[in-house]
Image: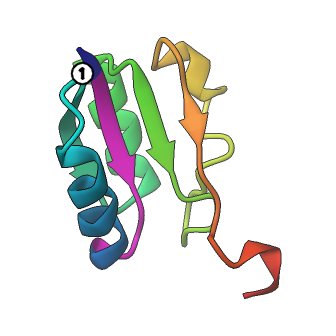
Amino acid sequence: MIRLVLVDDESIVRSGIALLLSGEPDFEIIADVGTGQQAVQVAIAQRPDVVIADVRMPGMDGWKPPGGSWTRRARAPMTAGHPCGSSC
């Protein structure tokens, strides 16, 4: 089982990704959060296998959380960007 954390400031995006992944038997979404700070707290506490994070969020983005990188918090991190690219 691959344990995932979804991070996006838009709840509809998190819901959509969760819906897409819900049909995959090897994925378990252990948390979905709306801020980078929440993501760091969940990653430290839950030790997910993968963090799927929006790269453009207010306050703290998905590229680099405070104090280092996602590799310190998740075993195999992944970052997803906006579907429209950097122009939106």
Where's the C terminus, which quadrant? bottom right
Residue segment shown in magenta: 3-11
Residue 67 placement: quadrant: top right
The residue sitting at 37% across, 76% down in the picture is 10
Q: How many marks?
A: 1
As drawn, 14 above or below 6: below
Question: Viewer-proximal residue, 28 or 67?
Answer: 28
Q: Is residue 42 left or right of residue 87?
A: left
Residue drawn at x 46%, y 19% as measured from the top left: 73
Please say if 19 is above or below 12: above
Residue 10 in magenta stretch:
yes
Q: Which residue is mark 1?
A: 45
Name the side, left or right, on which 54 lies relative to 12: right
Viewer-proximal residue among 36 and 48: 48
Residue 43 drawn at (x, y percent): 35, 28
Tell me residue 55's x, y (percent): 63, 58
Neighbourhood count class around disc 1 (C-alpha, 10 Å): few under 14, some 14–19, many 20 upward: few
- Above or below, 7 relative to 52: below
The structure residue drawn at horizontal position 40% and vertical position 49%, both measured from the top left corner, is: 37
Residue 68, image x and y in percent?
Answer: 66, 26
